[in-house]
Amino acid sequence: MYLEQFFIDGLGCASYVVGCEGAGSAAVIDPDRDVQKYLDATRERGMKITHIIETHLHADHVSGNTDLAALTGAEIYVHEAAQAEFPHRKLTGADTITLGNVELRVRFTPGHTPESITLLVVDKTRADEPWMALTGDTLFVGDAGRPDLVGLEAARELAGHMHDTLHNEYLTLSDGVMILPGHGAGSLCGKSIGSVLSSTLGFERHHNPALQVHDRDAYIEFATSGLPEQPGNHKRIKQINRRGPRPLGEVTPRPLMTQEAVSQFRRGAALLDTRSKTDYKTKHIPGAVHLEADDQLSNRVGFVLPPDVPIILMLSDASEYRRVVYNLARVGYDNVVGYLSDSLATWEALGLPVTSGDVRDIEPDELSDLLEHGNGHRPIVIDVRERWEYAQGHVPGARLISLGEFARHVDELDPRQPVAVICASGSRSQSAAALLGQKGFDTVYNIVGGTVNWMQHGLPLERN
């Protein structure tokens, strides 16, 4: 038997190839959009991809299933409850997929979504009992899948299903079964997913908080409270996956000269500047959205750019193009027109405007001083955490606008008034600050280290 895990930092997504080298057949489970790695891995081992299996329809990233199907001819398998609209084979909780000496036994495990499945992996050359469980977004290392990404109105019902799944399916497995989840740390599909990418059922049985709550009603409360913000653009991503993603095809760099880019900007394209913060602050094109080309780009772009807008990239190096395009495509931003190949010096030489400066990072004590002595420069403080986080304690007088709602409320703010943005640790506030900068706000502060750092400085919190 052959099994390999592929992990995407930032999004925290894991996908898998499982196969039988003797039979030359393999299945890809939960593929992401950069499918070449699956083709390379199976080709090196003399296997052909014959099955593409989704543990559920994802809400945090767009699947690469249609790309992989187009390249391999393999069929896509999804549980019948998914109501998928693309060509696929329907699975039930009693199906078995055979790959030579390897069996993938399907178990219906709703809770994260109504259609979630788990694949019990059996290597017939070793034993007839399951060796591993590919758990998708149902059971994680140290956590279980959140129930609210289908919709808040369905969260409590799904949390009840999750309780039943955990106790009637997972806890009946032997302690030695390996747990191979669909996400690791960084994903928003759980509350506190561990950074280790595998575990055993026995260890999780004793140490996973989600498996310690045995009463069904108590579990529903446990699963629906304290949830992190929902992934940006998640409803659209879910719908894309239900319809079937448009195959991305081969990604090749598309250089744009300045005049070509200007023509695109006049037709409504956005400029996404992915250079370092230092380079951006030194000089940039007015109106550009700044998000660095790091592991968090996929998580942040959904909060600052509309999903269908044509995008032109500004890159530190043209070699980054493919990686950035895949980071955007993974969350449904497929309309990348190309990248600006001319330098900013060329842009200026043509008489086009540039500017400098950026969102300013400040420490909590600087914010405290501005709030107390700022006079005409006193900023309004916007807390972009979730309501439950805000209620536990916030900067006195801070206004709550959660990151998921921020784009819809930004026009309520006065761009002439200084704005200080804060979250828990400084990550979410960066995304909100980038949007304010793109909207032309005169003075924007990002609070380094967020509310945690504010508390560590011994500064007061307000609770209401």
Image (cartoon, rainbow, N blue to C red):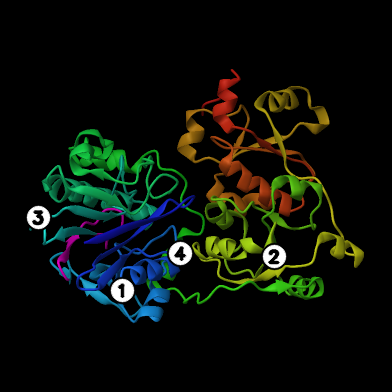
Q: CA distance from mark 1 to mark 3?
A: 24 Å
- Label 1–label 4 contact, CB within 8 A: no
Badge 1 amino acid: Ile
Identify residue for label 4: 237
- Across and down, in percent, residue 43 comes to 35, 72
* Image quadrant occupied by the N terminus: bottom left
Q: CA distance from mark 1 to mark 4?
A: 25 Å
- Label 4–label 2 contact, CB within 8 A: no
- Across and down, in percent, residue 278 comes to 74, 45
Q: CA distance from mark 3 to mark 2?
A: 54 Å
The residue under the point 88% across, 62% down is 348
N-terminal-most mark, 1 or 3: 1
Read off the magenta span. Answer: 100-117
User: Can residue 168 be seen in the rendering of this structure?
Assistant: yes
Badge 4 amino acid: Ile
Graded by Cα atoms within 10 Å as few (under 14), some (14 to 19) or many (20 or more), the crowding at tag 3 reads some
The residue under the point 21% across, 54% down is 133
**Is 113 a magenta residue?**
yes
Which label belongs to residue 49? 1
N-terminal-most mark, 3 or 4: 3
Graded by Cα atoms within 10 Å as few (under 14), some (14 to 19) or many (20 or more), the crowding at tag 2 reads many
Badge 2 amino acid: Ala
- Label 1–label 2 contact, CB within 8 A: no
Nearer the camera: disc 1 or disc 4: 1
- Label 3–label 4 contact, CB within 8 A: no
- Across and down, in percent, residue 414 comes to 75, 46
Nearer the camera: disc 1 or disc 2: 1
Identify residue for label 2: 270
| Number of numbered tags placed on the structure image | 4
The residue under the point 70% across, 72% down is 255
* Residue 358 relative to residue 238: left or right: right
Nearer the camera: disc 3 or disc 4: 3
